[in-house]
Image (cartoon, helix red, strand yellow):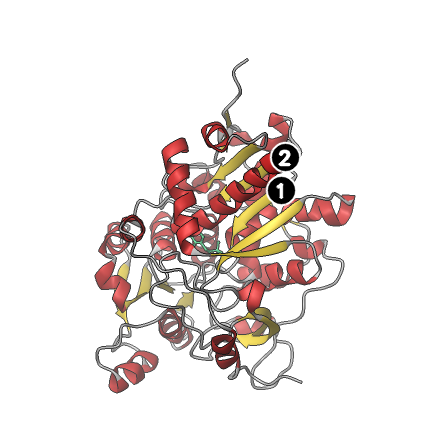
Amino acid sequence: MTEQHKFFLSENDIPTAWYNILADFPEPLPPVIHPGTLQPIGPDDLAPLFPMSLIMQEVSTDRWIDIPQPVLDVYRMWRPTPLIRAIRLEQALNTPARIYFKYEGVSPSGSHKPNTAVAQAYYNKIEGTKALTTETGAGQWGSALAMAGKMFDIPVEVYMVKISYHQKPYRRSLMSIFGAEVIPSPSERTQAGRAVLEKDPDSPGSLGVAISEAVEVAATSGGAKKYALGSVLNHVMLHQSVIGLETQKQLEMAGEEPDVMIGCIGGGSNFAGFVSPFVREKIVDGKQTRIIAVEPAAAPSLTKGKYVYDFGDTGEMTPLMKMYTLGHSFIPAPIHAGGLRYHGMAPIVCHMYDLGLIEARALHQNPVFEGAVLFAQTEGIVPAPESAHAVRAAIDEAVAAREAGEEKVIVFNLSGHGHFDMSAYDAYLAGKLVDYELSEEEIDKALANLPQIA
Ligand SMILES: *Cc1c(COP(=O)(O)O)cnc(C)c1O
């Protein structure tokens, strides 16, 4: 018998409501607090930055939140995404395990990020926002929001880290094709940008500075412009739940119960969206699924960070969130090519970890790229370097299943393709990537400027 490779749902199977894990946590999420008053923040504190419907989603504990029809109509362009059995990878590993991956790289910008970009653009449009501001590093989020802005006819301003703007021009081109304005950061347009340029006119920029610029432009626009964030926040995790809800249906079609589920974590959104319906099954039905979050050893927030209140950005402009953090002044080693560079982690993912609902693992970049190349050579898809962390962990689990002689079902999320990341692959193939582990000393140093909260 030939084994089935792909599990496709019909367009009618696209979820019509997002799943909100805040409804099912056995303990509530720690509140977000104001850095001045140290009191929990309310919706009004966020109103200068986000439309009220997204703020209400941010704090909602409703289990299901309906997806508006215009958002579903855009999702339909690429959703449902396929669940694919990696049969050739299984054969190459000679493993009794069955490996499945959910493939989010079929979206127009090549990752899971449009799942939230489209929703955010929609809510901003109906609440009258005149333009969206955001930051981008390598350009995945910027290109997703640029596309979504075009779909809902809302201009998008992207502050792009200057060194990426010059070294990674193709994502910049994609954003321009989708009609966004791309500004190299630090720029002369903001107080935050000018302050950096004054000290160092040749500053290469950083994600932290770009966030500060995008936030400043929105906060000082008198309500005309709002800010959009591609990860970390609760409403982003909510929108990404379409990934996990579809995966649940597809595993049912395949007649499989997952033993192990795996996703990579940068800010935590593709992971949270993929696993939250399965975390619910652990909480509500007592299922024993192992759920693994994979991060780079060069930016190990869950495995080496501290679970404390910290700022979301380098410029100390955001509210304080309780998260596993390496400190908001953390900057990853320049040699690190694997993405996933954020200093903190989504509070929802941190809460899952703190409650013992998920495991975490940190991997070095050479084995990660080695796994990605094996995946490309067997399955034909070049993973995004971020997604490659999940690929490697799935390979390691499949090898462990072989050694134990166990028929495990391993399911991972392939959050995007790597077609814009060839320079990282070139560096790996040329033997130029160095495995870099953050030392305890560096972590202590970065954690020294945490805000002091009693
Ligand atoms: C942005 C990105 C990530 C990391 O962000 P999360 O919020 O952790 O999902 C992972 N994979 C791809 C392909 C990305 O573009």
Q: Nearer the viewer, mark 1 or mark 2?
A: 2
Q: Quadrant of the N terminus?
A: top right
Out of 417 and 336, give the one closest to the viewer. 336
| Pointer 2 residue Cβ closer than 8 Å to ligand 1 | no
Marks 1/2 in contact by CB < 8 Å: the verdict is yes
- Residue 334 x/y as whole percent: 34, 67
Q: Is residue 335 above or below residue 252?
A: below
| Pointer 1 residue Cβ closer than 8 Å to ligand 1 | no
Q: Which numbered disc covers residue 453? A: none
Element type at mark 1? strand
Q: Residues within 10 Å of mark 1 (few under 14, many from 20)?
A: some
- Residue 309 x/y as whole percent: 60, 76
Out of 276 and 119, give the one closest to the viewer. 276
- Residue 423 x/y as whole percent: 27, 52
Q: Is residue 160 above or below residue 380?
A: below
Query: Residue at point 72% right, 64% down?
Result: 28
- Write down the residue under mark 1: 260
- Write down the residue under mark 2: 408
Q: Quadrant of the C terminus?
A: bottom right
Amino acid found under the numbered disc labelled 2: Lys
Q: How many marks?
A: 2
Q: Residues within 10 Å of mark 2 (few under 14, many from 20)?
A: many
Element type at mark 2? loop
Indicate which disc, 1 or 2, sits on the residue closer to the N terminus: 1
Residue 88, by quadrant, is: top left
Marks 1/2: CA–CA distance: 8 Å
- Residue 343 x/y as whole percent: 48, 69
